[in-house]
Amino acid sequence: MSGSVLRRLVFLVVATRECSALVGRTSLPSARISVDTSITYQEVDGLGASQAFQRAEDVLGKYGLSPAHQAEVLDLLYSLDKGAGFAILRNGIGSSNSSTSNLMNSIEPLSPGSPHTQPNYTWDGYDSGQFPLAQQAEARGLRTLYGNAWSAPGYMKTNDDENNGGYLCGVAGEHCVSGDWKQAYADYLVQWVKFYEEHGAKVSHLGFLNEPQFAATYAGMLSNGTQAADFIRVLAKTIQKARLDLAITCCDGIGWDDQEAMMAGLQAGPDPAEQYLTVVTGHGYDSAPTYPLSTTKKTWLSEWADLDGDYTPGVFYDVDGPGEGLRWARNVQAAFVQANVSGFLYWIGAENSTTNSALINLLGDEIVPSKRFWSLAQFSKFARPGARRVEAHSSASLLYASAFRNTDGTIATQVINNATTAYAVTLAVAVEGGGGKLHSNCVVPYLTDNAHNLTALAPVVLARDGTFQTTVPARSLVTFVSS
């Protein structure tokens, strides 16, 4: 026996000891998942959520969460080692002159009298709990802090109210007796960013609208694409003058179709506002992200949640309800694969409630991570910022696949089994620049279903033909991580 053959035999024996099949493969329907890293798509910025409208205070113990459990929730949300490693936090830029109920404080609660009068900014170092939470998140590895205003302060708007719609004074078609407040609003937003940075939290992205098609009873502001473009041009110059390293986003439309409808206005004219944007943002409520927006910029699904369904924290699949984990696994995967998003944000990360509007429910001093949380974690933990989505194809109609190649060379393949039976799966990974195959002889599967939460299973060994033979359980999400 030659030395090279002996070395290969020893390698296979050791690999066989370390690797095993996921589960048995008897009498199961079969499918093939093919991954090709030579075909690349969008760059990943990450997944995340918000703690706006005083939900940050829920995590900081407002309703009895103990210091030890506060740290545990923060670890679950933002630590890569201990939790999901969420990369994006969306903080609300307040417009209220009080903090009653769940209102978010303004840094300029009282009108200076006119848009040309010296503003009187105030900073409490707390920002409805969002500032200390952002610091805790950044200490755990947060990559992106997104400051997003739901509304300008009421005195800057046509209806003189932060609530119930209204437009920013001075944008196309909207005039106020008090004057044009576009520059004052841009200064206001930039000052909020400066307060954060001066006190130790780096803001990377800035947005100025939230669901501008909807005149909500809470903070909000109406706008079409042309009106948003008017303000973006002012904001871009203001940021440049302040010498801030700050990306502009727009416009957090209430649905993907609503955001698409705003694109023409952002792209019109000799000085198109789109050129000043880094990310185009949209929500999933009125319409889901199932196609790419008409832009060359990165896109984020920046808010979506189950706001109306029954409380289903521990259900991955039962009746395919709106709050179930399998539904949200499909939502995330479709957003990345069909809409080419670079970021995906659920509405709230954690809050004290028994609803599905959060990923983690806090009940006094009890922590209840939902299956939605574990579904998002299976993407966030293994498709890291800077990763590229790569080609992934499934031969079975009820097996949905996505794949991402990280900057460290690891490849994460998510397989969603939407069927009522397990599948015997052949996973084939073709690697660009790696001799056409993986350097590792194993992939490690992580499983979430009704009985498992991001559970690491026994590694799966490379077959002689260079593929991995494994089983994906019924109604489950499995992420295969390889190097």
Image: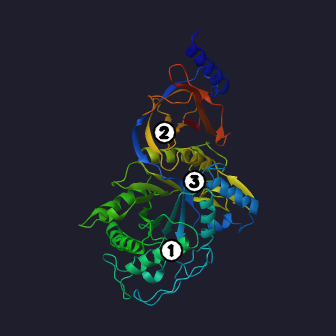
Expressed as whole percent of the image width and height from the top left, the position of residue 369 reads: 67, 52
Which x, y percent locates residue 443? 58, 32
Q: Nearest to the eye among marks 1 and 2: give it.
A: 1
Q: Secondary structure at mark 3?
A: loop
Label of residue 124 in the image: none
Which one is closest to the eye, mark 3 or mark 1?
A: 1
Position in image of residue 149 (x %, y %): 48, 70
User: Residue at 47% across / 86% down in the picture?
Assistant: 119
Residue in the picture at 70% in, 53% down: 368
**Residue 6: quadrant of the picture:** top right
From the image, tell me which residue sits under label 2.
Answer: 403
Count neighbours of disc 1 (C-alpha within 10 A) and say few if under 14, some if 14 to 19, many if 20 or more. Answer: some
Does any portion of residue 42 appear in the rendered image?
Answer: yes
State which quarter of the image contains the N terminus. Answer: top right
Q: Which residue is mark 1?
A: 194
Mark 3, residue position = 86
Compare marks 3 and 1 and give the one earlier in the sequence.
Answer: 3
Whether 402 is drawn above or below 3: the answer is below
Q: CA distance from mark 3 to mark 2?
A: 18 Å
Image quadrant where one finds the C terminus? top right
> Does the residue at mark 1 contact the one at mark 2 (Cβ under 8 Å)?
no
Q: Could you say where residue 248 lies in the image, as x and y percent from the top left? A: 41, 65
The three-letter code of the residue at mark 1 reads Lys
**Residue at disc 1, secondary structure:** helix
Find the residue positioned furthest to the left: 270
Residue count near mark 3 (Cα–Cα under 10 Å), binned few <14, some 14–19, many ≥20: many
Q: CA distance from mark 1 to mark 2?
A: 38 Å
Q: Amino acid at mark 2?
A: Ala
Mark nearer the N terminus (3 vs 2): 3
Three-letter residue code for mark 3: Phe
Sequence-earlier tag: 1 or 2: 1
